[in-house]
Structure formats: C-alpha cells, structure tokens
Amino acid sequence: MSDSSPVIYTIGHSNHTRDRSLELMRLHRIDLLIDVSANPRSRFAPWSNRERLQRSLAQCRVDCLWSGDTLGGVPSGPESVVA
C-alpha cells in the first residue's frame, strides 16, 4: 500500500460517550464518517442517532455520509429474532 492510499477504519460506539468517540476520531484524523446503519438510532447511545451524530460531527469538522439505505442490512426472518 502506498503512502497516498486512503486508510479506512471501522468504528462502533461500543459503550463510549459522544465526547470519547469524537476524541478517538480526532486522534486518528478521521475526516469522513460513512454511516452504514440501516436504522441509525439507539436507545443506549442516543447521541449516535443520525441527526444528532451529524450535528456533532459537523462541529468537529468531520463530514458524514449516511449510506444505510444502500450498504446497511436489516435482519429478516425468524432466525434473526432472539427470544
């Protein structure tokens, strides 16, 4: 891989706070986030909901592109249901 090749990271919010997640992106010089979440919302990390995340990223000068409609997946069928 040459020095001019882009570096691609995969991220998840895990149990990090919004501030910690943004700090990690800043430390790794991430300037574009492509969100592939089919349903970009969370009860456990509401700061990562689509609109809130986009606002937070804009304040940190990180571009955000939502591609969940084309790259995200929505489980279907009884095998994807955990009882």
Image (cartoon, rainbow, N blue to C red):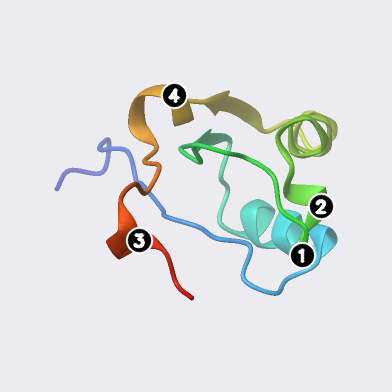
Earlier-in-chain disc, 1 versus 4: 1
Residue 51, x across and y down, in percent: 78, 30
Give the amino acid type for the residue marked by disc 1 in the picture: Phe
| Residue at (57% x, 39% y) in the render | 39
Residue 44 picture quarter: bottom right
| Marks 4/3: CA–CA distance | 19 Å
Disc 2 residue type (three-letter): Pro
Residue in the picture at 74% in, 42% down:
49
Other residues around mark 1 within 10 Å, as few (<14) / some (14–19) / many (≥20): few
Alpha carbon separation for disc pair 1 and 2: 6 Å
Q: Amino acid type of disc 3?
A: Ser
The residue nearer to you, when weighing 72 against 20, is: 72
Question: In x, y percent, where is residue 58?
Answer: 78, 28
Mark 4 = which residue?
69
Instruction: Tell which tag, 4 or 3, sits nearer the viewer.
Output: 3
Q: Which type of secondary structure does the marked residue at label 1 adopt?
A: loop
Q: Are marks 4 and 3 in contact (CB under 8 Å)?
A: no
Element at label 3: helix
Sequence-first disc among 1 and 3: 1
At 75% across and 39% down in the image, what residue appears? 53
Q: What residue sits right under mark 1 in the picture? A: 44
Q: Name the residue that disc number 3 marks.
A: 80
